[in-house]
Amino acid sequence: QKKASMKNVARPRPPPPTPCVATCNSC
């Protein structure tokens, strides 16, 4: 499970919810 989480982090995943909120505010 831990290895899978690390692989997910290394993969180009969408930005966390924190930056998403900032983008929404900018919009």
Image: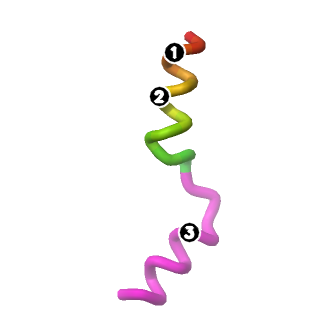
Q: Nearer the viewer, residue 19 or 13?
A: 19
Look at 45% across and 77% down and name the residue there: 5
Look at the image and give the residue range highlighted in magenta: 1-13
Residue 11 bears which disc, if any? Answer: none
What residue did someone put label 2 on? 21
Amino acid type of disc 2? Val
Check the image and report above or below for 1 versus 26.
below
Secondary structure state at the residue bearing disc 1? helix
Q: Is residue 5 above or below residue 13?
A: below
Circle 3 residue: 9
Residue plotted at (63% across, 71% down): 10
Q: Which residue is mark 1?
A: 25
Mark sitting earlier along the chain (2/3): 3
Q: Are marks 2 and 1 in contact (CB under 8 Å)?
A: yes
Whether residue 24 appears in magenta in the rendering, the answer is no
Which one is closest to the eye, mark 2 or mark 3?
2
The quarter of the rendered structure image containing the C terminus is top right
